[in-house]
Amino acid sequence: MAGEIMTEPETIAAAGGPGTGAAAGPAGVADGASPAAGADAAAAPEAAAAEAAAAGADAAGADAAAAGAVAAPPEGAADAVQATPDGLAGALQQAWDTLAAGGPVVALLGAMSVFALTIILAKSLQFAGPALGGQRAARAALRLYREGRPREAWERVEGRRGIAPRLAGATILGLAEGRSEPRLREEVTIRTADRLEAMRSWLRPLEVIGAIAPLMGLFGTVLGMIDAFAALEQAGSRVDPAVLSGGIWEALLTTAVGLAVAIPALLAANWFERRVERAEMACDSLIGGFFSAEVPGETAADATARNRYPDAHDPSYAQAAE
């Protein structure tokens, strides 16, 4: 028994008993964990350094990517550069599509603009001619006639094709032939009025285009607004603002085109009319000056004397009288 009793403690002691095993277990764990913990603690700075290096590499990569994004051309830039020669065609096509959105009103305004441009070009060529020129020579002829030098006055306007010089030449010729002043005055007035009226030709259609074009543009705008609100009503509760805004800009397009047609037409018509009015005023002044002039030392017989004027049948006289 004693041997057995003594054997159990020894067995227990040898086996590491409950208390000793428990104490040794934690100690052993602590002793076994201490090298691992030391290794982890030693590796922690290296891991932090590696993470910092990785973060720096990522930041550098991000900066390089950003720099590449700034330096690299956007997508489609090469296509845009290659399409530059077609830019004018594209702009013309876009302008055509925009005008086509205006409908038949814009088409009618386009036809009116072509007609107005034709009139403006034709009248510009007419007014650039000699018809309204020579007013200074006509005034000089009047001054010479009132100074008692009618022959020099007639020579001053001889061969000129302007309305004012031809008026002065015809008046000097008629007075030299001793014709009745009232009848001669009426003849030169009518002839001058006919020539000035020829200069006013086609100005009235230009004025009509300038007055009607804005009204037609406004009419197209009203029609476009009607269509826009009709489409808005059909949409019902599913109202799309793009439907209304698209209809409004198409409607306002006709007003813009109408104003673009009217403004140049009115400017040209008023400029042409003003030039004709100035020529008319100059002719009226010449007629009044010739028929109210009192030539010093001249009598009716002297005025018709051939030694003071060329032969009345001379072709140059006939040209001045035309």
Image: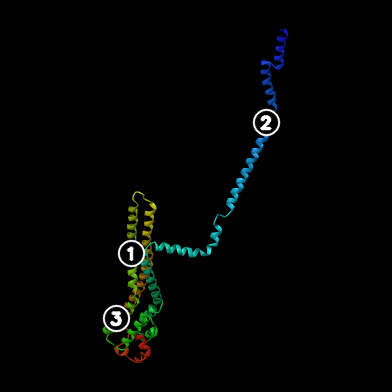
Label 3 residue SS: helix
Which amino acid type is shown beneath numbered disc 2? Asp
As drawn, the residue found furthest toward the top would be 2
Amino acid carrying label 3: it is Ile
In the figure, is residue 95 to the left or right of 312? right
Residue at which label 2 appears: 40
Number of the front mark, 3 or 2:
2
Residue 143 seen anywhere in this rendered image of the structure: no
Quarter of the image for the C terminus: give it: bottom left
Mark 1 is surrounded, within 10 Å at the Cα level, by few (under 14), some (14 to 19) or many (20 or more) other residues, namely many
Q: Earlier in the sequence, mark 1 or mark 3?
A: 3
Q: Which residue is mark 1?
A: 216
- Residue depth check, mark 1 versus mark 2: number of the one nearer the observer: 2
Secondary element type, mark 2:
helix
Vertical position of residue 107 compared to residue 282: above or below? above
User: Which residue is disc 3 drawn over?
Assistant: 190
Q: Is residue 103 above or below residue 273?
A: above
**Depth-wise, is mark 1 or mark 3 nearer the camera?**
1
Q: Amino acid at mark 1?
A: Met
Gap in Å between the C-alphas at discs 1 and 3?
A: 39 Å
Badge 1 element:
helix
| Residue 61: image location, x then y, percent | 62, 46
